[in-house]
Amino acid sequence: MTSDRLFVYGTLMRGFDHPMAQLLSRSADFIGEARCRGRLYRVKHYPGLVLSDDANDVVFGELYRLRQPNELLREFDMYEACGEGFAEPTEYVRRMLPVTLRDGAVREAWTYVYNWPVAHLPWIASGRFLEG
C-alpha cells in the first residue's frame, strides 16, 4: 500500500523547531488539520498514538502531502526508529490509517503508531499534544 500523505500529531507539526519538523515543512505540502481515531499518550517530550475502536477517542494533528514519499518515509522511519535494522518490537510502527480533514473528507495516510505498553503513561484526553 502506498500513499504520499503523512498524518503527524506531535513534534513534527508546524510550530516545532525540531530538525525533522523543518524537513517536513520544506519537503511536503500542508493539506490541513486532520484527526484520526485513537488515544494519545505523553511518552516523554513527545506523544504516542495508540489505535482505538472507540469513536470518542480522537487524536488531532496535521496532514501533509510528501513531495518525495519514498525518500522522506525512509528518513522519518529512521527518526521514529522503526523498520529495517531496528530491534523488535520497535517503539513505533508506520501504519496506513483513515484520517478526517476539517471539511469531513476522509483520506488514507501514513502515520506512526506507538507500539510499546502505555499502562504507565499519562493519557492526553483532549487528543491534542500541545494540550497534554
Image: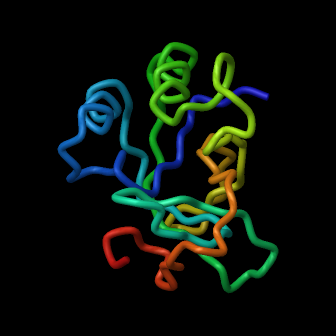
Q: Between residues 81 and 12, which one lies in front from this camera angle?
A: 81
Residue shown at 71%/51% (left/top)? 97
Residue positioned 69% across, 51% down in the render? 115
The one nearer the camera, 20 or 99, is 20
Image height of 106 relative to 83, above or below:
below
* Residue 65 picture location, percent across and down: 48, 34
Say whether residue 67 is left or right of residue 101: left
Left or right relative to 41: residue 25: left
- Residue 48's place in the image compared with 87, above or below, is below
**To which quarter of the image does residue 121 belong?**
bottom right
Residue 85 image point, x, y percent: 65, 17
Query: Residue 4 versus residue 23: which sits nearer the camera?
Result: 23
At 69% from the left edge and 62% from the top edge, which residue is drawn?
A: 117
Residue 77 found in image quarter? top right
Residue 46, placed above or below residue 21: below
Residue drawn at x 55%, y 65% is: 35
Q: Position of residue 5 (x, y in %)?
A: 56, 37
The quadrant in which the C terminus is found is bottom left
